[in-house]
Amino acid sequence: MKKNIVLIGFMGCGKTTAGKQLATELGYSFADTDQMIEHNAQKTISEIFAAHGEEYFRNLETETIKEMMKSMEHTVVSTGGGLPLREVNADILKENGFVVYLRVKGSTVEERLKGDTTRPLLQGDSVSEKIQNLLEYRDPIYEFGAHMVLDVDEKSVDEIVEDISRNFKLLCERNNEKNNRD
């Protein structure tokens, strides 16, 4: 496994915030798949959804991570919330880094994203219901695609970063010991 850390989870769980801090603490680069897609498409995600639909956007996600992971090393990657839903994407992520699922409750998401109009899947009425339905569907997929699951609702960014960093270092030490024995 490459020495990357990949953060997955629902929108608003803190992937970008924690990812940037984690990258700084480890001396790693930071990459955000949504930002890369927006940069390459010269459109916001909302504009891509409106013009081309969700399936087109999901294809862009797959193309983006395939390209990113070819040369990426010592990078913390924040993924879009839906990116790991495709099995091929989850496989690519797991092959190329330590995947951490930042698990969050619906009530936390709703509070954090209150007033955010940039999330295409949360537009319209019944936002609480949409969040709950998406979380129920996605949670087992996120769990399956991760090496580590971290509940983040009651944790500060510092605590999240510390937990990920500690577990990543343990994994690296174990891999080094295993490689030395082989």
Image (cartoon, helix red, strand yellow):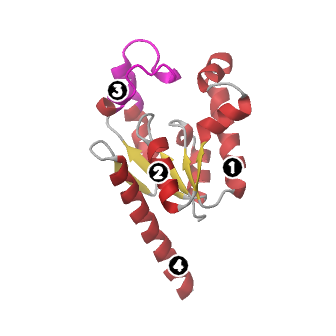
Q: Residue at x 67, y 53 (%)?
A: 69
Gap between marks 1 and 3, in whole Å?
Answer: 31 Å
Mark 2 Cα shell of 10 Å, populated few (<14), some (14-19), many (≥20): some
Residue assigned mark 2: 21
Q: Earlier in the sequence, mark 2 or mark 3?
A: 2
Q: Earlier in the sequence, mark 4 or mark 2?
A: 2
Question: In the rendered view, does 170 fall on the left or right side of 61?
Answer: left
Region rendered in magenta:
109-134
Q: Earlier in the sequence, mark 1 or mark 3?
A: 1
Q: Name the spot of residue 124 as percent of width and height, x first.
A: 44, 12
Gap between marks 2 and 3, in whole Å?
Answer: 23 Å
Please say whether residue 132 is one of the residues in the magenta stretch. yes
- The answer to whether residue 153 is visible is yes
Look at label 3 and name its amino acid. Glu
Mark 4 Cα shell of 10 Å, populated few (<14), some (14-19), many (≥20): few
Please say whether residue 56 is one of the residues in the magenta stretch. no
Q: Earlier in the sequence, mark 3 or mark 4?
A: 3
Look at label 1 and name its amino acid. Met
Look at label 4 and name its amino acid. Asn
Residue assigned mark 1: 68
Mark 4 secondary-structure assignment: helix
Mark 1 secondary-structure assignment: helix
Q: Mark 2 and mark 4 in contact (Cβ < 8 Å)?
A: no
Mark 1 Cα shell of 10 Å, populated few (<14), some (14-19), many (≥20): some
Q: Residue at x 56, y 39 (%)?
A: 83
Task: Tell us which disc is closer to us: 4 or 2.
Answer: 2
The residue lying furthest to the top in this view is: 125
- The answer to whether residue 59 is visible is no
Residue assigned mark 3: 110
Q: Earlier in the sequence, mark 1 or mark 2?
A: 2
Residue assigned mark 4: 176
How many numbered badges does the structure rendering display? Answer: 4
